Image: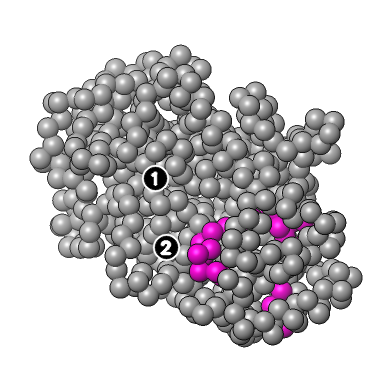
């Protein structure tokens, strides 16, 4: 497979403009220009994208339609039919989620004298964490500092970050790198043994540390192996479908379901850590997503019913460079590494139209503007609109073999379809990527519900309304570890009460009394793609 004929004229213009673009530096946008393009073209700002929540802790606040619908469904189970007297598992710390945040929480709880139990609805490690590419930010260079990192994160988040959370994030960064190295994570290094770093959009220092373009797999597999080596109990293919409370309103465990047999079991726990990840499979605004198959926002729903307060449910992050062609690459990420190393965003006329390292929200918005308003996008045979990411510029700037060295996974992905990213640009389009908002926590990862902790993408406030590249991995580690430690220490002083689903009964009753009827139940657990809309193809529209 190569590019179809209707794209080849544009490819000629891209190739012809390279010599000129090598000499030209595209200037960053002004603050006013950024505000305007976000207002006009960022997907969550479209008319009809938001509506008010009609029930729960955030009642009356604006939320994305998809989030609101997920919250305003009836429970997956009928709480009146649950026999809570038959306790299958009785543990000190229950960790829900098997990605990197859950793994970090489990290891840290274990190190604090408690053997937790993990439950994950797919296999241990199957998660967005495993799929991520770019790396982890941390201020370990002598010319950098957590204070500078803080300012970068604050600017990237639009100054909406919760200060105490951002402070915890950046201050823990250097220690997280040391911890991961001690576990055996193989970061790319210089010959003298110093960890390599690169730039990301919106950062003033090179502080992104990585394992080629397979950083997620490089870190997650080490964490997973450590959990298995310590014989921490893990229930694979087991979903939490509802949290349990006690007579004091504290979190007290979860109702679990075996994904293969649908068998229900009860896990009583002194403390619970939610590490269920994001919600990209809700396909906000009908965009394709980079997210793992299980990213359906389960933890959000369960915590909301239990009474946890949320923050920034009106925003998600779109990654500007997801695959657009071939069709098999739609939704697969093309890491920001490419742009930080020299690849340029180029329209159908071969013109660079944006500084390559603007923040992700701005870059996404400008790409959409270039396609829809300026009419300079490239359309695939299935109707997806995108622009070129001129990857051959990487080798032109840095020498032959550079792209293969820094992005071997991307290189091989496209070579499967006879597209050589050393010689031909990659067609990209914005894709749904990250959940900026989530459960509001404090700097010890405690939610507003006693004995319920959260770490990773399920919580919100750390990144404000837009996340910088690599800060997600630091968030996963910092608050996964803090959640594990807090849950372990708290479990030592908790005296279990009588477990209950009264909060679920009340939530369902309130839905009924207000006449709220949203089709289906939640949590969704796995996405349903057997619909006419999906058969026509998910695409940014």
Left or right, 118 with respect to 100, comes to left
The residue segment tinted magenta is 324-350
Left or right, 248 with respect to 488, comes to left
Q: x%, y% of residue 313?
A: 44, 56
Element type at mark 2: loop
Element type at mark 1: loop
Numbered label attached to residue 283: 2
What residue is shown with label 1? Answer: 309
Q: Majority secondary structure of the magenta segment?
A: loop
Residue 158 visible? The answer is: no
User: Residue 217's image quarter?
Assistant: top right
User: Does label 1 or label 2 sit earlier along the sequence?
Assistant: 2
Outermost residue on the right side: it is 23
Q: x%, y% of residue 466?
A: 58, 56
Q: Are marks 1 and 2 in contact (CB under 8 Å)?
A: no
Q: x%, y% of residue 230?
A: 47, 19
């Amino acid at each position: 497979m190569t590019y179809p004929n209707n794209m080849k004229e544009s490819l000629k213009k891209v190739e012809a403009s390279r010599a000129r673009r090598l000499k030209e530096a595209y200037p960053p946008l002004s603050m006013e220009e950024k505000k305007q393009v976000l207002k006009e073209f960022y997907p969550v700002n479209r008319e009809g994208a938001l509506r008010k929540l009609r029930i729960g802790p955030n009642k009356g606040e604006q939320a994305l339609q998809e989030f609101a619908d997920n919250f305003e469904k009836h429970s997956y189970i009928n709480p009146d039919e649950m026999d809570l007297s038959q306790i299958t598992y009785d543990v000190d710390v229950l960790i829900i989620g098997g990605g990197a945040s859950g793994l970090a929480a489990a290891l840290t709880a274990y190190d604090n004298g408690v053997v937790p139990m993990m439950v994950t609805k797919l296999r241990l490690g199957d998660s967005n964490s495993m799929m991520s590419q770019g790396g982890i930010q941390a201020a370990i260079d002598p010319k950098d500092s957590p204070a500078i990192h803080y300012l970068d994160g604050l600017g990237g988040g639009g100054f909406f970050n919760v200060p105490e959370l951002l402070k915890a994030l950046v201050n823990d960064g250097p220690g997280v790198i040391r911890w991961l190295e001690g576990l055996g994570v193989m970061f790319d290094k210089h010959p003298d043994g110093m960890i390599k770093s690169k730039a990301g959009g919106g950062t003033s220092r090179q502080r992104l540390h990585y394992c080629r373009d397979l950083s997620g797999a490089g870190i997650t597999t080490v964490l997973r192996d450590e959990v298995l080596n310590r014989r921490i109990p893990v229930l694979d293919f087991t979903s939490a479908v509802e949290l349990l409370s006690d007579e004091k309103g504290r979190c007290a465990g979860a109702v679990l379901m075996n994904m293969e047999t649908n068998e229900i079991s009860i896990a009583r726990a002194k403390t619970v850590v939610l590490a269920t990840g994001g919600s990209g499979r809700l396909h906000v605004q009908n965009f394709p997503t980079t997210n793992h198959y299980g990213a359906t926002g389960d933890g959000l729903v369960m915590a909301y019913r239990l009474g946890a307060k949320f923050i920034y449910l009106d925003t998600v992050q779109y990654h500007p460079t997801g695959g657009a062609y071939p069709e098999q690459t739609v939704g697969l990420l093309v890491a920001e590494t490419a742009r930080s190393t020299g690849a340029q965003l180029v329209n159908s006329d071969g013109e660079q139209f944006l500084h390559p390292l603007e923040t992700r929200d701005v870059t996404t918005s400008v790409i959409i503007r270039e396609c829809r308003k300026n009419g300079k996008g490239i359309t695939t045979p299935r109707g997806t609109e995108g622009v070129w990411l001129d990857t051959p510029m990487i080798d032109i700037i840095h020498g032959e073999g550079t792209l293969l060295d820094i992005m071997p996974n991307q290189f091989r992905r496209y070579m499967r379809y006879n597209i050589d990213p050393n010689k031909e640009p990659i067609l990209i389009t914005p894709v749904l990527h990250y959940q900026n908002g989530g459960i509001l926590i404090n700097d010890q990862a405690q939610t507003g519900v006693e004995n319920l902790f959260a770490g990773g993408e399920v919580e919100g406030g750390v990144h404000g309304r837009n996340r910088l590249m690599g800060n997600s991995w630091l968030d996963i580690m910092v608050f996964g570890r803090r959640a594990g430690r807090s849950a372990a220490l708290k479990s030592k002083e908790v005296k279990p009460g009588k477990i209950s689903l009264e909060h679920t009964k009340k939530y369902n009753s309130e839905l009924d009394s207000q006449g709220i009827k949203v089709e289906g139940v939640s949590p969704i657990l796995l996405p349903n793609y057997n619909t006419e809309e999906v058969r026509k193809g998910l695409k940014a529209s």
